[in-house]
Amino acid sequence: MQTKNIMIVGVGGQGTLLASKLLGRLLLSKNYDIKVSEVHGLSQRGGSVVTYVRYGEKVYSPIIDKGEADVIVSFEMLEAARWTEYLKKGGVIITNTQQVNPMPVITGACEYPKDLQNKIRESGINLDAFDALSLAEKAGNAKAVNIVLLGRLSKLFDFTQEEWITAIEQSVPEKFLELNKKAFLLGREYEV
């Protein structure tokens, strides 16, 4: 099997690391060789965070280069735009339509870019953009955006819903389990 590459990108505090841990746990349970690499920008200051998840028969490096990502899962629109050059031809970006203002926008030094969805689509990229925040809130907590996005990502895999739920059970504290299961199912079942 050819190595597959998934990038999970967002802003510090959005749960990108939990999402990569959960995905990694599931892939390991399916006997793939897997490498995960986390890059923390100023994550505690709302900076960019990216996680590389590479899996296949044998994976030698945890790093994904430009033009190699099969899928980019983005927790925020500007982060989706920031990482487009890493997507391979024919790949897909799954993104939350939420906008999180970076520090230069907060301070007034610049404006949040307008019409990012159309700009990304016009560049020929397959963009699956939806309001994951609303679905997370419907599940019971805005912080469940990460699990809603994994639910959406799960549609690209042949793994059963039960296998994904087992990975959630192994990755999430008991008191948040039902919330996260609901968030996963809302993301998996959502139709654009």
Image (cartoon, rainbow, N blue to C red):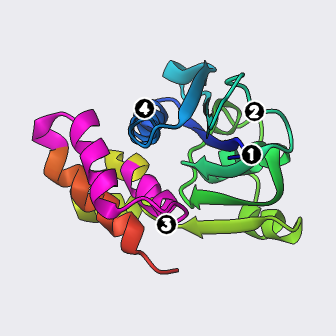
Say which amino acid is labelled 3: Lys
Label 1 crowding class (10 Å Cα cut-off): few <14, some 14-19, many 20+?
many
Q: CA distance from mark 1 to mark 2?
A: 7 Å
Please tell me whether the stretch drawn in magenta is mainly helix, strand or loop. Answer: helix
Q: Nearer the viewer, residue 73 or 130?
A: 73
**Residue at point 75%, 50% (across, down):** 81
User: Is tag 4's residue or tag 3's residue first in the polypeptide sequence?
Assistant: 4
> Circles 1 and 2: CB distance less than 8 Å?
yes
Residue 120 in the magenta stretch? The answer is no
Residue 43, position in %: x, y?
A: 54, 23
> What residue is disc 3 on?
155
Q: Residue furthest right?
A: 123
Identify residue for label 4.
21
Query: Residue 95: x percent and y percent?
Result: 59, 57
Camera-nearest residue between 44 and 25:
25
Give above or below for 63 relative to 160: above
Q: Which residues are magenta?
A: 147-176
Mark 3: which secondary structure? loop
Disc with the residue nearer the chain's start (1 vs 4): 4
Inter-mark Cα distance, 3 to 1: 17 Å
Q: Amino acid at mark 2?
A: Ile
Q: Earlier in the sequence, mark 2 or mark 3?
A: 2
Above or below: residue 115 compared with residue 85 = below
Q: The residue under label 4 is which amino acid type?
A: Lys
Residue 98 in the image: x percent, y percent? 53, 56
* Mark sitting earlier along the chain (1/2): 2
CA separation in Å, label 2 and label 4: 17 Å
Q: Can you tell which quarter of the image residue 162 is in?
A: bottom left
Dot 1 corresponds to which residue?
69
